[in-house]
Amino acid sequence: ALTVTMGQSKREASTQAGMALFKQAGRVISSLSLARLNAYAGIRAFSSILSQNEVTVDMIEMGDTPGEVAVVKLNRPDKLNALTVTMGEEFVATMEALKGVDSLRAVVLTGDGRAFSAGGDLLFLRERSNDAAIFNSEEMRAFYSRYLSIRSLPVPVIAAINGPAIGAGMCLAAACDIRVATKKAKIGYTFASLGLHPGMGATHILPSLIGPQLAAKMLLTGEVITGEEAKSAGLVLDAYDSSDDMMEAAVAMAKKIGMQSPTAVRGAVRSLRLVQESNGGGLDRSLWREADQQAHSYASADIREGIDAIIEKRSPVFANVVRPHKVHQSNDIKDEE
């Protein structure tokens, strides 16, 4: 229950309750930030984080300049930060809470442990292969929205790719405004190798970053490249020898952004994203197209072969596409024999 003392508003009491939650979790966030949080939404959001702890937030004060930088981490290191529905719900809650922090100047998104994100959780993918296509379209569109909520933040987001960023994990990094990586980080859109159509904005955002021809190569071959190669391709801004060097550079860049006019920066971020999102009929249209195509993929034998190959640590062997009438003709010939 929320206790309100004499001379204290309900909003102030909620803010203090939020501070207590952060202290229990061992996080540091300034009272200035908490005072600007929407009281109830903020507490609900961070209560979710505290109970699940699959997304963490650290606030870094700018120092002499007013404002703060948030470092958001995906926190399933034992699973290489594979993306799940539960993590996605926490992620949305985190974004909603951060949007209420008026002192926020920039965000750095990274992964805990040795990976940024290995992509969609295999159990989730297998469950989708057992569901009806109409439900899968809706489920996948909702899945995208949870993680693409990173684009709802009014401030620039820097993806710090500390290790493997594969499939949906790389889609999340690509959805950020700027990307940096370690030189040896493994980066790829391996959907086709899994038997799955690309999703989470891959077919919309990637061509705008590296051009249609190179995007087609990455999406159609499932090629995995290094952070250093990604820099040469223009997919990341810079590549560093170590995760520590990369994080230091990412936070320094975030602070440099934070020293600029927040009004100008927020407006520029909105303009840049709108240009990217308006291409090709709009991002929302692309996301629905991808969700529908992924629903078709889940109905095929290819996705099951792709998942089995990962589990069995072998290369997948995909059968040829067979038209239904050819199957019937083949059966008729066998009957005649």
Image: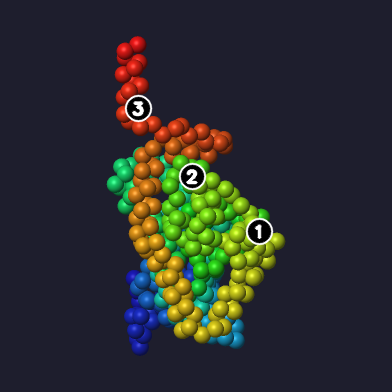
Residue 37 screen position, x and y as percent:
41, 77
Name the amino acid, label 1.
Glu
The residue depicted at 29 percent of the width and 47 percent of the height is: 134
Q: Which residue is mark 3?
A: 326
| Above or below, 278 relative to 142 | below
Mark 1 neighbour density, 10 Å: few (under 14) some (14–19) many (20 or more): many
Query: Would you name the residue on which mark 1 appears?
Result: 228
Badge 3 vs badge 2, beta-carbon distance below 8 Å: no
> Is disc 2 placed on a helix, strand or loop?
helix
The answer to whether one can see residue 144 in this image is: yes
Residue 113: % across, % down = 60, 56
Q: How far, Cα to Cα, is label 1 from label 3?
A: 47 Å
Q: Is residue 193 above or below residue 270?
A: above
Q: Amino acid at mark 3?
A: Lys
Separation of disc 1 and disc 2 at Cα? 23 Å
Type of the residue with mark 2: Ala
Outermost residue to the bottom: 7
| Residue located at (52% from left, 55% from top) | 213
Identify whether 89 is placed above or below 223: below
Any part of residue 78 in sight? no
- Specify the quadrant that holds the N terminus: bottom left
Q: Position of residue 268 (x, y in %)?
A: 47, 78
Residue sitting at the far top = 337
Towards the viewer: 13 or 95: 95
Crowding around mark 2 (Cα neighbors within 10 Å: few <14, some 14 to 19, many 20+) is many
- Residue extending farthest front: 213
Mark nearer the N terminus (1 vs 3): 1
First in sequence, mark 3 or 2: give its number: 2
The residue beneath circle 2 is 192
* Front tag of 3 and 2: 3
Q: Is residue 166 above or below residue 332?
A: below
